[in-house]
């Protein structure tokens, strides 16, 4: 099958493009791998970081009232594992509402959860199949190249993945 547009990626830019193209009554193939649908912002960036920061604010400020007349007899305890589970539930809910659910309601979009590569003019290969389209949009996240840095104590410093990722190394 030939598509009007093949989009490589599954984040907000990919979804915005897909929604516009479908609105124009065109047929789209979206190929996504790596992060789940929603991309960086939903899965490991903006949303999880803001959720954890809000939890930290709530914990910190609840123990430090602005008025001296307010006294807390017992201190709140912070449970990091529960915080991470709560963040994960929020991410999953956002992914379902804003991406998976939207995708189900858009007619004319096919999602393929596979790694893609450009195979030629107007051609993309994914899952050992060749797909063709009039246009191809590459909407994937960019990441900096990790380079080792040596400090005075001759220890190597390496770049870690996002602290909000489930697949943290270290």
Image (cartoon, rainbow, N blue to C red):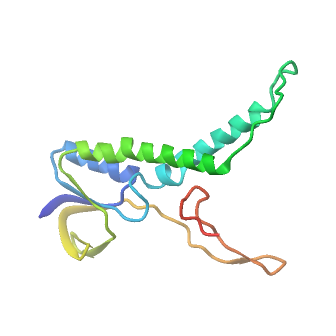
User: Which residue is found at the position 23% from the left and 44% from the top?
Assistant: 106
In the foreground, 47 or 170: 170
Give coordinates of residue 39: x percent, y percent. 43, 55
What residue is at 43 percent from the left and 43 percent from the top?
93
Identify the residue at the far front of this view: 74
Q: Is residue 113 above or below residue 98?
A: below
Q: x%, y% of residue 137? A: 30, 60
- 11 displayed left or right of 21: right
Against 168, residue 63 (above or below) is above
Query: Measured from the top left, where is residue 10 in percent x and y?
Result: 36, 56
**Quarter the N terminus occupies:** bottom left
- Which quadrant holds residue 149? bottom right
Measured as percent of width and height from the top left, residue 96 is found at: 37, 45
Q: Is residue 16 visible?
A: no
As displayed, is residue 143 above or below residue 4? below
As displayed, is residue 129 above or below residue 42?
below
Q: Residue at x 80, y 81 (%)?
A: 154
Q: Nearer the viewer, residue 8 or 63?
A: 63
Q: Quadrant of the C terminus?
A: bottom right
Q: Quadrant of residue 147?
A: bottom right
Q: Quadrant of residue 110?
A: bottom left
Tell me, yes or no, if residue 45 can be seen here: yes
């Amino acid at each position: 099958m030939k598509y009007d547009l093949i989009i490589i990626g599954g984040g907000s830019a990919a979804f915005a493009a897909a929604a516009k193209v479908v609105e124009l009554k065109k047929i789209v193939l979206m190929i996504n791998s790596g992060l789940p649908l929603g991309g960086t912002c939903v899965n490991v960036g903006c949303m999880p970081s803001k959720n954890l920061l809000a939890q930290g604010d709530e914990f910190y400020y609840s123990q430090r009232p602005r008025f001296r007349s307010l006294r807390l007899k017992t201190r709140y305890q912070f449970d990091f594992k529960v915080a991470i589970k709560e963040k994960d539930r929020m991410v999953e809910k956002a992914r379902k509402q804003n991406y998976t659910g939207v995708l189900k309601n858009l007619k004319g979009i096919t999602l393929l959860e596979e790694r893609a590569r450009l195979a030629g003019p107007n051609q993309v290969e994914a899952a050992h199949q060749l797909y063709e389209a009039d246009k191809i949009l590459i909407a994937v996240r960019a990441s900096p190249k990790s380079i080792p840095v040596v400090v005075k104590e001759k220890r190597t410093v390496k770049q870690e993945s996002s602290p909000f990722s489930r697949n943290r190394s270290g």
